[in-house]
Image (cartoon, rainbow, N blue to C red):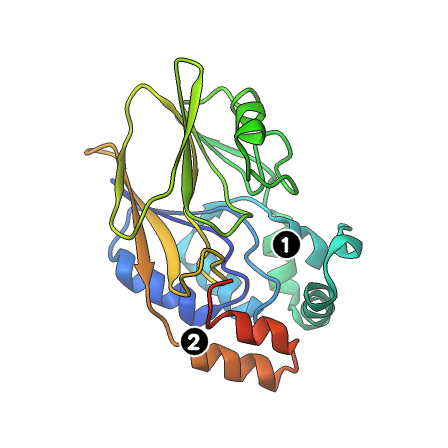
Amino acid sequence: MRIGIISDVHANLPALEAVLAALGEVDALWQLGDVVGYGPHPDEVVARLRELGAIGVRGNHDAAALGGGGVEYFNPEARRAMEWTIERIAPATRAWLEALPERVEEGEVTLVHGSPREPIWEYVLSGWVARQSFAAFTSRWCLHGHTHIPVAWVQDHGRISLLEPGPGDALRLGQERLLVNPGSVGQPRDGDPRASALVHDTEARTLTWLRVRYRIAEVQAAMRAARLPPALVARLEHGR
């Protein structure tokens, strides 16, 4: 099987479509939350994922769009974009988001948005948090998003190390336990503006990172037309 793994689409339809085209034919699509927020296409992105039968979890922006709280912790630009999203989303979009769980177990893998310890909000940005996260799930490996940065934390005989993969890099699934982030489709933050995703080949037992160019200017034009914050528009060019 080939499984596409995406996270943090953030209502960016051209980025999602570019990633789907690069993934090609897959047997399943897993999404790790923050489907909406920031971007101009919340209904369109949700409709596309629903059409594809994507399996996944709820992120903090998805929860906020449903009135689940947390907007008070957003920076001013993110808050303005979320207020726009709350006013914009259709009932079908809201129903799809409401049905998303905070955590999914799929065989030997756990899916969350933030961390297995705090699925909605916690950022895995340090070795200390990674160590606490490994203690919070029992499967062989865990997929998460939230940081918008493609990385993998590896636990081998108690030792934890960080891998920072480049485009096309593959990680073989062995006996080590893993905490893996595919990066962001709709708003990368590692200095590379290209959309980021993962492919899981279950036969080869590999995870391979992809980086995909998409029509950034088209998204920016749609954001300006929606009067979304200029800072959110500009950052797409820089991947920050």
Task: Point out the residue furthest to the right here.
Answer: 72
Residue 201 is at least partly visible in this image: no
- Residue depicted at x 46% and y 45%: 55
Please tell me in which quadrant of the rendered image residue 140 appears. top left
Cα distance between the residues tagged 1 and 2:
23 Å
- Residue depicted at x 38% and y 64%: 194
In the visual, does 73 lie left or right of 159?
right
Residue 66 x/y as whole percent = 71, 56
Which sits earlier in the primary sequence, circle 1 or circle 2?
A: 1
Residue in the foreground of this view, choosing between 141 and 176:
176
Vertical comparison of 221 with 163: above or below: below
Mark 2 burial class by Cα count in 10 Å: few <14, some 14-19, many 20+: some
User: What is the secondary structure assignment of the residue under circle 2?
Assistant: helix
Residue 120 x/y as whole percent = 64, 42
Q: Amino acid at mark 1?
A: Asp
Q: Amino acid at mark 2?
A: Ile
Q: Which residue is mark 2?
A: 216
Vertical comparison of 81 with 149: above or below: below
Residue 200 x/y as whole percent = 30, 41
Residue in the foreground of this view, choosing between 54 and 239:
239
Q: Which residue is mark 1?
A: 62
Vertical comparison of 56 with 202: above or below: below
Q: Which mark is residue 187?
A: none
Quarter holding the N terminus is top left
